[in-house]
């Protein structure tokens, strides 16, 4: 079981809320009710509500980040193997770092991979929120603009369905601004019209693609 700072923070908030709520109940039910006791009880109840809301927000962020991968340097996001199967048609086998893979039949001369990147403010790093990315989709791409307009388009999702979409939430909820420094998309593309293998890498500046040199055949 891996250590998750978000789960720890959410649990701490929940525990603090429970203790504060219990203290508030004891103080407000005890007789006689003095002004000081009522004031402390009300403050304890308010603190419980604040901690509960904070824990809920942390839990929601944790759910929204499921599927995202932490990004601290240039990391391997995927390996893509291309195999032509016809004119302006090829198969792309995408292998993720966890070993999972899938095949996609794409139309075009090139493949393009898009990703979504979330960058948090430095203070949010204390909660374990670091820059994270998620591969979003793979598409076929034509070199010619005319082909791009007239030929068939192919696009496939690479990201799982999210119960909480932090990208959409950030656009609708301005109060998330103190947490999220930036959210942006990045895309990279290269040719898919020949047998080849490529590394798709990601850094805080976005995606890039490099061809993997073929392994020399043994001689003798």
Image: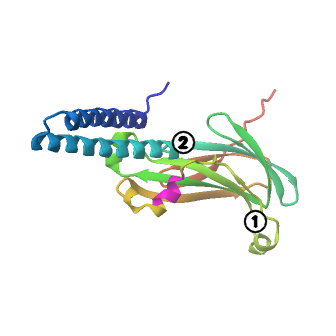
- Name the residue: 34% across, 37% down: 13
Q: CA distance from mark 1 to mark 2?
A: 33 Å
* Residue depth check, mark 1 versus mark 2: number of the one nearer the observer: 2
Secondary element under disc 1, as helix, strand or loop, is loop
First reached walking from the N terminus: tag 1 or tag 2:
2
Q: Is residue 43 left or right of residue 6?
A: left
Within 10 Å of disc 1 (Cα), the crowding (few <14, some 14-19, many 20+) is: some
- Name the residue: 54% across, 49% down: 164
| Image colouring | rainbow
Any part of residue 133 in sight: yes
* Residue 124: numbered disc: none
Within 10 Å of disc 2 (Cα), the crowding (few <14, some 14-19, many 20+) is: some
Say whether residue 69 is magenta. no
Q: Position of residue 109 (x, y in %)?
A: 78, 60
Name the residue carrying label 1.
142
Q: Position of residue 10 (x, y in %)?
A: 39, 37
Q: How many marks?
A: 2
- Name the residue: 54% across, 44% down: 68
Q: Main secondary structure of the magenta part?
A: helix
- Name the residue: 74% across, 42% down: 102
Q: Is residue 154 left or right of residue 46?
A: right
Name the residue carrying label 2.
66
Secondary element under disc 2, as helix, strand or loop, is loop
Q: Position of residue 4 (x, y in %)?
A: 44, 33
Q: Position of residue 115 (x, y in %)?
A: 58, 53
Outermost residue toward the top in this view = 1
Outermost residue toward the right in this view = 86
Q: Is residue 85 left or right of residue 125?
A: right
Any part of residue 72 in sight: no
Q: Nearer the viewer, residue 120 or 145?
A: 120
- Asked if residue 146 is positioned above or below residue 2 in the image, the reply reads below
Q: Which residues are magenta?
A: 165-170
């Amino acid at each position: 079981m891996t250590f998750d700072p978000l789960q720890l923070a959410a649990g701490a908030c929940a525990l603090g809320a429970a203790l504060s709520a219990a203290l508030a109940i004891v103080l407000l039910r005890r007789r006689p009710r003095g002004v000081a006791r009522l004031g402390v009880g009300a403050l304890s109840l308010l603190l419980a509500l604040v901690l509960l809301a904070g824990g809920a927000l942390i839990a929601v962020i944790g759910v929204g980040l499921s599927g995202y991968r932490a990004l601290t340097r240039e990391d391997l996001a995927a390996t893509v193997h291309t195999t032509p199967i016809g004119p302006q048609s090829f198969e792309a086998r995408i292998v993720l770092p966890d070993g999972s893979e899938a095949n996609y039949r794409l139309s075009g001369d090139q493949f393009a991979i898009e990703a979504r990147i979330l960058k948090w403010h430095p203070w949010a790093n204390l909660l374990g929120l670091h820059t994270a990315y998620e591969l979003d989709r793979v598409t076929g791409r034509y070199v010619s603009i005319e082909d791009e307009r007239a030929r068939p388009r192919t696009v496939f999702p690479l990201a799982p369905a999210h119960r909480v979409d932090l990208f959409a939430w950030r656009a609708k909820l301005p109060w998330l601004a103190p947490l999220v420094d930036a959210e942006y998309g990045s895309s990279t593309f290269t040719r898919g019209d020949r047998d080849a293998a490529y590394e798709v890498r990601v850094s805080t500046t976005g995606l890039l693609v490099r061809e993997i040199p073929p392994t020399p055949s043994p001689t003798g």
